[in-house]
Image: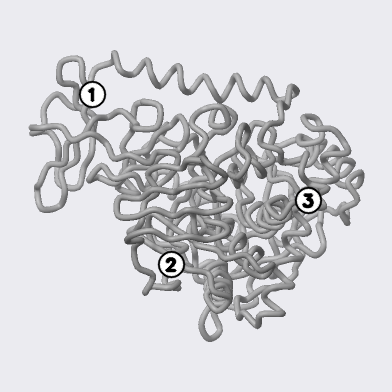
Amino acid sequence: MVSTSLWMETEILPEAGALKGDAHCDVAVVGSGIAGLSSAYELSKRGQSVIVIDRQGIASGMTARTSAHLAPLCDDLMSEFRKLRGAENAKLFYESQAAGVDRIEEIQASEKIACDFRRLDGYLFQGHGMPADIIDQELEAVQEVGAPVHRLVGVPLKGCESRHVLRYPRQATFHPLKYLAGVAAVCEANGVRFFANSPVEEVAERDGAVTLRTAQGQITAGHAVIATNASIAERFQLHSKVAPYRTYVLAFAIARGELPDALYWDTEDPYHYVRLQTGPDDHEFVLVGGEDHKSGEANDAEERFARLESWARELIPAVGSVTHRWSGQVLDTIDYAGFIGREPGSERIYLAMGDSGQGLTHGVMGAMLNSSLILGEDHLWKSVYAPDRKPLAAARNFLRENMTILQNLAEYVTPGEIASLEELKLGEGAILRRGLEKIAAYRDKAGELHLHSASCTHIGCHLHWNSFETCWDCPCHGSIFAPNGQPINAPAVSALRPVQR
C-alpha cells in the first residue's frame, strides 16, 4: 500500500499555474500549507495584496500528512515546557495555541466551510508500564496555565480501564484539507494570487523590499512570510535549534459508535495518538499514529506499521481493515515552541518555522502573530515565539539534537551500503561509495538508474534512503529530495548534483 493520507483526495486550486515573469505585492507568502494559507487569509482580510507561492501543488506538503488533532496543550507535555520556559511563557503558549483552535472554529463558521470541525474531549492516559506520576506532574502544570482539566481513571480502550488519565474539555478536530480548500477559495475571492510548482531559489532583502527569485520569474514584495516550516531564508542559526522527526499513521475502518469520539494519546515515548474521522454511511475511520524516529535514522517503515497495527488492534478490537497509511515529518524545536516572527537580522522577512508536532495550531496562531507584526502592531505572544530567543534551559536538548550533525558527517568515511550498482533492485535506493565520493543511487521500476551526490544541498549532510516514501531524507535539518534529485521539502532549495555512471 502506497503512502496516501486520508486527506489527499481533496484537491486545492488545481488550476494554479507556475510563476512566469515578474509580480508585485504587499506580502509574499512562501509555502501553502496551513501556515501559508492562514497567513494569506489574515493579511488579505486586512487589506494587503498577497501572493502565495509553492514549490509543489497548493497544500500538497506536510499539512496533507497530519493526523489533524487540534490540541492546544504542549505536544511534549506542559510540565516539560514549563521547565524550559517558565510559568509565564507556558501560560502564553497555551493561550496562543488555544486561540489558534478558536480561530479555526471562527473561520469555518463565518466562511461556511464544511470541514467536519467539532469540539470534543481529549484524553492523556498513562502508557503501558509508564509511571503514574507523569499524570500528576502534568495535572499541576496544566492547572497552572489555566486550562480546564479533570483527573480520571480509565479510558474506553481495552486494557486501559485502570490507567491514570487527564481529560481535557474543548479540544477539537477537523478535516484539514477541506478546511484549507475553503480558506483558499476565500483568499482567491479576496484577490490573493497563487503560483504552484514554482520553487523559490533565493530570498533577498534589499532597497526596502524583499525579492523572491524562481527559475522563471521574480516576486517583489514589501514583506515576505517564509511559511515552509523549515526556513529557506535562514541558513543555519535557527536550523541548529530544530530536529526533524518522522511519524507514522494508519487509518482503519470501524463501525460508527464502536469508539467514543475523542482525542486520545498516551505517555509512552514515542507516544501513540488516536482520533476518529467521519466516513461513509455507517462507518468511520480510526486514525492511529506513532512510532516516531529521527528523520533518516531508520528505514523500517513496514516494521513500524506492524507494531502500530498490533497496538491498535489490542486496544481497539473493533477496528477493521487498514484503509490508508502514510508518514509525515515534524520539526521539533529544542524548547517546543515554533520560531515565529521577524527573521533575525532582517527587517521585512518573517518566519513560521518549527511545528513541534503541533503544526495546525502553530500555523494558524502564527499567521495571526505575523500579520500583526507586519502591520506594525505589537503582540502579546511575540516573546514566546521570537526567532532570536536563546532558551538557555534547553541547552541539553540543543547539544543532543546537534550530535546528529557530527555523527552524520562522520558517515562520509564509512563504506557504502552497496558495493556495485548491479546490487540495486527495481524501486530501491542505496548509498554507493566511489573513491572519496558517496553517491545516492536509485533504480526506478523501469530499470533506469538515477545517480546523484549523497550530500544535502543545505549544509552538506549525508542523505539516507526512505523506502516507504521513495525519497532521500536528510537527518540533520529535514530536507527531502525526490529520486530525480529535486528538493521536495525545505530547507534545501537546490537540486542534488547529478553523477555520471
Type of the residue with mark 2:
Met
Q: Which mark is residue 438?
A: 1
Q: Quadrant of the N terminus?
A: bottom left
Badge 2 marks a residue whose secondary structure is: loop
**Residue at horizontal 72%, vertical 59%?**
100
Badge 3 marks a residue whose secondary structure is: loop
User: Counting residues from the N terminus, which is met first, the one under dot 3 or under dot 2?
Assistant: 2
As measured in the structure, the alpha-carbon distance from the residue carrying label 3 to the one carrying label 2 is 38 Å
Q: Tell whether 156 sits left or right of 318.
A: right
As measured in the structure, the alpha-carbon distance from the residue carrying label 2 to the one carrying label 1 is 35 Å
- Which residue in the structure is indicated by mark 3? 162
Is residue 118 something one can see in this rendering? yes
Instruction: Tell me which corner region of the image, top left, top right, bottom left or bottom right, holds residue 397.
Output: top right
Q: Out of 48 and 484, give the one closest to the viewer.
A: 48
- Which residue in the structure is indicated by mark 2? 8
As measured in the structure, the alpha-carbon distance from the residue carrying label 1 to the one carrying label 3 is 53 Å
Local packing at callout 1 (Cα closer than 10 Å; few below 14, some 14-19, many 20+) is many
Badge 1 marks a residue whose secondary structure is: strand
**Residue at horizontal 51%, vertical 48%?**
228
Type of the residue with mark 1:
Lys
* 165, above or below 458, in the image: below
Local packing at callout 3 (Cα closer than 10 Å; few below 14, some 14-19, many 20+) is few
- Residue 68 is situated, as x and y percent measured from the top left of the image, at 60, 61
Q: Quadrant of the C terminus?
A: top left
Label 1 with label 3: CB-CB less than 8 Å: no
Q: Out of 185 and 448, give the one closest to the viewer.
A: 185
Local packing at callout 2 (Cα closer than 10 Å; few below 14, some 14-19, many 20+) is some
Q: Tell whether 471 sits left or right of 344.
A: left
